[in-house]
Image (cartoon, grey):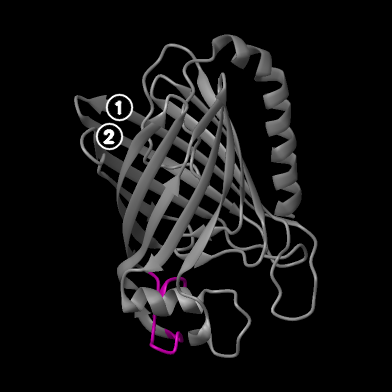
Amino acid sequence: MKTDTGKAWIMILLTILLTSFPVSAIAAEEPAPAAEARPAAEATTPTVDRITGEVTAAVLSAYIWRGQEMTRDSVVIEPSLTANYKGFTATLWGNLDTNPYSAGVAKHSSNWTETDFILSYAREFGIVKAGAGYIYYGLAGMTPNGADLPDAQEFFVTLGLDTLLAPTLTVYREIDHYHQWYATLGVSHTFSLHERVGLKLTATASYLKSEDETTYPKFNSDSIATTDKFNNFHDGVVSVSLPVAVAGNLTITPTASYVFPLSDDARYEMRARGLKGTANPSDRDSSYLYGGVTLSLTF
């Protein structure tokens, strides 16, 4: 089962962390803000002549991915390990659902639902930041004994400007099972509240163009799938975070995010994919507010 694979990756992450900690204490630079819950594919990497990296652990009240409710009424734990070298970045990320949702009375033990691998390269040309990469999504079942979901693979390109609000455009192309294009345009700004405390505001809008009506269909107003492909603005995300440099290379970041549909088509689809136990899909939620805290250790 993929759940066992996910646990194996966590053991590898912990081993690397324990063996690399003395090095991180010696080679640490100025503290950096903690990463978002899921590693941002559009993030650029400074070109340096030595390996740098980051280990993070996020504890959040929900896992919402591209407007989809992946967990409900459950705390999730999301560890990640990132390594950077001369513009290249490799990231391993995972999600543990501590209380898998059930619409009935059934109770499930914690479940490792996902293990992702991200490989990317980025460069800066003056104020222009450009990059490209690959993501492999290793997906398990929603419950411990549930059937594994088909894995996914994506390529992406990103283009950003190092200017006011740091506008960044990222385009993803899924090539394995869930054939679709997904594009995001995001802006962000960080205010310095103290030499060790910042206030970061981000906003992102997305557009989804499906190429397969069986995996990403358009839904009608009753949130029932049609035979058409989804092709419209999708989800918006507004986030606020408070990165606090605790000591040395350790940062703690409380965060809160609000996810909402950008079109009626997106509202119908997000309700259809929601987990809330109800006879009518149209009665499910289409917007989500969640938050938590991320611990980040740079080396």
- Residue 27's place in the image compared with 163, above or below, is above
Left or right for 258, reference 70: left
Q: Is residue 224 above or below residue 133?
A: below
Q: Please tell me how crowded label 1 is: few (under 14), some (14-19), or many (20+) other residues with Cα within 10 Å.
A: some
- Residue 276 lies in what quarter of the image? bottom right
Q: In which quadrant will I find the C terminus? A: top right
Q: Residues within 10 Å of mark 2 (few under 14, many from 20)?
A: many
Would you say residue 66 is visible in this rendering?
no
Residue sitting at x 21%, y 38%: 164
290 over 45 or under it: above or below: below
**What is the secondary structure assignment of the residue under circle 1?**
strand
The structure residue drawn at horizontal position 70% and vertical position 46%, both measured from the top left corner, is: 6
**Range of magenta residues:** 212-225
Q: What residue would you read off at disc 2?
A: 130
**Quarter where residue 158 is shown:** top left
The residue positioned farthest toward the front in the image shown: 194
**Which amino acid lies under the numbered mark 1 shown in the image of this protein?**
Arg
How many angstroms separate mark 2 from mark 1 (CA)?
6 Å
Q: Is residue 86 left or right of residue 255?
A: left
Question: What secondary structure is marked by label 2?
Answer: strand
User: Which residue corresponds to the image point at 54% horizontal and 74% vertical from the top-left?
Assistant: 274
Q: Considering only order in the chain, which callout, 1 or 2, is on the residue closer to the N terminus?
A: 1
Q: Kindly indicate the quadrant of the structure image that contains residue 213.
A: bottom left
Of residues 273 and 236, the one drawn nearer to the viewer in this rendering:
236
**Image x and y of residue 76, in percent:** 65, 54
Q: Is residue 252 above or below residue 236?
A: above
Residue indicated by mark 1: 123
Between 26 and 180, the one nearer to me in the picture: 26
Instruction: Measuring from the top left, give residue 250's x and y in whole percent.
Output: 58, 26
Q: Which amino acid, mark 2?
A: Ala
- Name the chief secondary structure element in magenta: loop
Location of residue 292 in the rendering, given as x and y in whole percent from the top left corner = 58, 50
